[in-house]
Image (cartoon, helix red, strand yellow):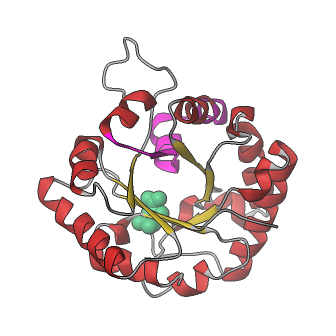
Amino acid sequence: MSVDQPLIVGNWKMYGLADSLAEACKVAHALADRPSRARVGLCPPATLIERMARALAGSVVIVGGQDNHMEEDGAFTGDISATMLADAGAKLVIIAHSERRVCYGESDALAAAKAQAAAMAGLEPIVCVGETLVERQSGRALEVVRSQVFGSLPDYLKGRPFALAYEPLWAIGTDMTPTVDEIVQTHTALRQAMVERLGEAGKRAPILYGGSVNPKNAHEILHAHEVGGALVGRASLRGEDFLAIIRAID
Ligand code: PEP
């Protein structure tokens, strides 16, 4: 099975002011000196997207957003459309991160609409799925993430670049991670679900693992079967740590 090039993306969440751009530049300079076999992206808060895109112009680091509205424009105070993200210099966008599913009640159907809007604007959506601790402990993890795949990936993604991110909720920001066997088992089930959902298109898109990835555990996780990269939260805020994770894939 030929899977797209691995993808490692940093999610800065609601962290970062202008001086944080120096961390992004550190990563870009290091990758210019020694390229990685992975594609690398950084998703800062919306306020920094345009400035980061300018600071990283000409580098291999791709800039992304953390969410987009499903409509192209309209009376939606506080929201940002995919077209606006693209206009600001973004090339990819995180969709349905669990913090959005939990804090704002985002459903699979909304995730699918947002992913379609992103792809229509020329962005590469990274669609997030993941189970809660209770769901894992009760043996329902695979059933939950399969159902999220079926509900959150629109037909429109067929033939267009996208990625899936498996982010168990209980591993995000907690320093807990599934075992490598659990990650492999879940990613294998996700691959199967993606193929059932999207056919050929489901065979190629990388499946990123996200949840407490750090420089110490990155090598083991990134080399596991069906792991096509990582979505990294806290450890992407420091250029040095993010770079150590990127280097772990080479
Ligand atoms: C995330 O925010 O997507 C994430 C995985 O966070 P962390 O790496 O901090 O667990």
* Ligand 1 visible in quadrant: bottom left
Position of 231 relative to 119 (above/below):
below
The total of numbered circles placed on residues is 0
User: Would you identify the image quadrant in which residue 130 lies?
Assistant: bottom right
Question: Residue 199: horizontal and vertical position, in percent?
Answer: 85, 46
Residue in the picture at 74% in, 66% down:
186
Seen at 77% across and 48% down, the residue is 201
Residue sitting at 50 percent across and 40 percent down? Answer: 123
The one nearer the camera, 35 or 176, is: 35
Q: Residue furthest top?
A: 75
Q: Residue at x 46, y 76 (%)?
A: 175
One can see residue 129 in this view:
no
Q: Does the magenta run of residues contain 106? A: yes
At which x and y percent is residue 222? 59, 78
Give, as a single range, the part of the protein colored magenta: 89-112
In the picture, which quadrant includes the N terminus?
bottom right
Considering every residue shown, the one lying at the far left of the view is 19
Q: From this viewpoint, which residue is outermost toward the front?
A: 58
Q: Is residue 231 above or below residue 75?
A: below
In the figure, is residue 91 to the left or right of 157?
left
Q: Is residue 225 magenta?
A: no
